[in-house]
Image (tube, rainbow, N blue to C red):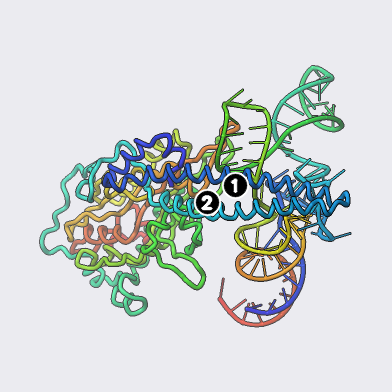
RNA sequence: GGAGAAGUGGCAGAGCUGGUUUAAUGCACUGGUCUUGAAAACCAGCGUACGGGAAACCGUACCGGGGGUUCGAAUCCCUCCUUCUCCGCCA
């Protein structure tokens, strides 16, 4: 969440940010409410503290009286303390309500967008940051969508997934399963080569973790929840990997934190049905390699550029046509200051599929995580970033469609070492 | 899952018959004295959060989390979590 000190100091900027996110003037008033409540909170706290100071002093005096055998003189003081405690109790109740209300409001304020983020309300307002320079492949009318190709070559089976689990849980098999494995290994090897340390994190996380990266309370309905154990299935590796740093204070200059991890991702995607979610376009479980960085505020945007270059290189090597979008305020994630989406062109469906999202959260997550770094004697919130590199299901969809031919599906050269040297799936 | 033990500041570790504990002591760390330099020795400092203050500094809270008893809780009670030992189960 935003720092209260920032809301106080840069009130106008915070409000402008909400406007970029398409908030109404009325909604934006929440900022003023927060400041009022914080004042209230401080007042109450000061009052409570000074009363407690008195009770502490009286208690000490009582102790001294007892030790010097003047028990009867303590009675009056005891009464004073009892009265004060009664008052404190009342004030603490008020304070609790104020703090709770304040926190809820704070949680409801999204990150302030970077100045580069265009205003806008829907995905149609996203800015094309880098378009595909070439012409898009035209496979003609005979081109098959990936779900048909999957049947032809026995790559994945959605009906079996339905039988075993339900809609949206694909079962990969044969060359399709191997292709998943190949892509995961390719992505991990590339991340490792770029200096990211590989981690295999837990796939279920507790509430603190889900809150730390901002999935809670904003996206509660998006996650699978295990009530019996009070755990959430991760919607992305971002959650367990970023939470590695929850509560940390990094030593001076210690910004070598580049992590990558493969995990399955689980998303409820409630209410998303219809033709546009066919096949692998939108599923409840998919595989993804994520890259995560913790950076000094002065260098986080340089890191973001590196991450964009990293993801671009992956897609270049897979020979998939793609474009990069800079998300507009209305489409920007709640916790993000700026997000670039990568979309690949899926030639049979003739549509762009989002395969990566690379974001700088600046201090929004680190404030919730209490992730700081030391600089001299002071401590400051670090910047956190992450990006998909890459999400598999839609990459597979595009790969199958774009690479189909009479000889089967051509395997991109960079994947062949992972596919037993084969050039085609057939 | 069952039985038992334990969780104290960066680490180790006392306190746990409730009130000189503002959490002892050691190590680590920082500054200083000494030294050509270093080590050793000695001296001093050394946690986090919130609030007040220009600052020095002051106040409050924190001894796994939450709640309770009491004028007063690291210390007593309840509850949850975690770790360790033994047993059971198991990839």
Q: Residue at x 38, y 42 (%)?
A: A32
Instruction: Give the residue at mark 1.
Output: A48
The chain containing the residue under callout 1 comes to A
Whether residue A137 is visible here, answered yes or no, is: yes
Residue placed farthest to the left in the image? Answer: A141
Q: Nearer the viewer, residue B45 or A412?
A: B45
Q: Residue at x 31, y 76 (%)?
A: A162
Q: Residue A349 in the image: state x and y as whole percent.
A: 18, 60
Q: Secondary structure at mark 1?
A: helix
Q: Nearer the viewer, residue A287 or A104?
A: A104
Vertical arrangement, residue A174 with respect to residue B87, above or below: above
Please report contact status of discs 2 and 1: CB closer than 8 Å, yes or no: yes
Q: Residue B10 in the image: state x and y as whole percent.
A: 68, 46
What is the spatial separation of the Cα atoms under label 2 and label 1, in whole angstroms? 9 Å
Instruction: Give the residue at mark 2.
Output: A95
Q: Residue B81 in the image: state x and y as whole percent.
A: 60, 66
Q: Residue at x 40, y 55 (%)?
A: A289
Q: Secondary structure at mark 2?
A: helix
Q: Residue at x 18, y 44 (%)?
A: A134
Residue A303 - label: none
Q: Nearer the viewer, residue A332 or A52?
A: A52
A59 displayed left or right of A67: left
Q: Residue A129 in the image: state x and y as whole percent.
A: 25, 41
Whether residue A193 is visible here, answered yes or no, is: no
């Amino acid at each position: 969440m935003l720092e209260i000190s920032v809301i106080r100091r840069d009130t106008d900027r915070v409000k402008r940010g909400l406007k970029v996110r398409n908030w109404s003037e009325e909604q934006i008033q929440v900022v003023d409410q927060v400041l009022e409540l914080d004042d209230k909170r401080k007042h109450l706290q000061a009052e409570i503290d000074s009363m407690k100071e008195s009770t502490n002093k009286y208690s000490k005096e009582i102790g001294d009286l007892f030790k010097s055998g003047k028990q009867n003189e303590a009675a009056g003081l005891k009464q004073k303390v009892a009265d004060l405690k009664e008052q404190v109790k009342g004030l603490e109740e008020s304070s609790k309500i104020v703090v709770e209300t304040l926190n809820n409001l704070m949680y409801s304020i999204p990150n302030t967008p970077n100045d580069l983020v265009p205003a806008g309300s829907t995905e149609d307002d996203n800015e094309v940051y880098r378009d595909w320079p070439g012409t898009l492949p035209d496979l003609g009318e005979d081109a098959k969508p990936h779900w048909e190709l999957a049947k032809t070559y026995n790559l994945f089976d959605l009906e079996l997934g339905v039988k075993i689990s339900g809609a949206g849980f694909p079962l990969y098999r044969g060359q399709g399963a191997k292709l998943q494995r190949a892509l995961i290994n390719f992505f991990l090897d590339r991340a490792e080569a770029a200096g990211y340390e590989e981690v295999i994190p837990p796939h279920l996380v507790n509430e603190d973790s889900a809150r730390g990266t901002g999935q809670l309370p904003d996206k509660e309905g998006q996650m699978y929840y295990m009530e019996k154990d009070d755990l959430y299935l991760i919607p992305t590796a971002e959650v367990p990997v970023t939470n590695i740093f929850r509560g940390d204070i990094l030593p001076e200059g210690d910004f070598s934190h580049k992590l990558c991890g493969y995990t399955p991702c689980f998303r409820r995607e409630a209410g998303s049905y219809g033709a546009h979610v066919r096949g692998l376009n939108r599923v409840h479980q998919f595989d993804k390699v994520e890259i995560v960085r913790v950076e000094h505020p002065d260098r986080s945007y340089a890191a973001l550029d590196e991450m964009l270059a990293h993801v671009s290189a992956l897609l270049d090597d897979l020979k998939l046509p793609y474009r990069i979008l800079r998300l507009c305020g209305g489409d920007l994630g709640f916790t993000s200051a700026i997000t670039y989406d990568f979309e690949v062109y899926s030639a049979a469906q003739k549509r762009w599929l989002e395969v990566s999202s690379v974001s700088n959260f600046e201090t929004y997550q680190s404030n919730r995580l209490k992730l700081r770094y030391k600089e001299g004697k002071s401590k400051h919130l670090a910047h956190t970033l992450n990006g998909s590199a890459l999400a598999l299901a839609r990459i597979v969809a595009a790969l199958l469609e774009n690479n189909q031919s009479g000889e089967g599906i051509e395997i991109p050269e960079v994947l062949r070492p992972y596919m037993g040297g084969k050039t085609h799936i057939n």
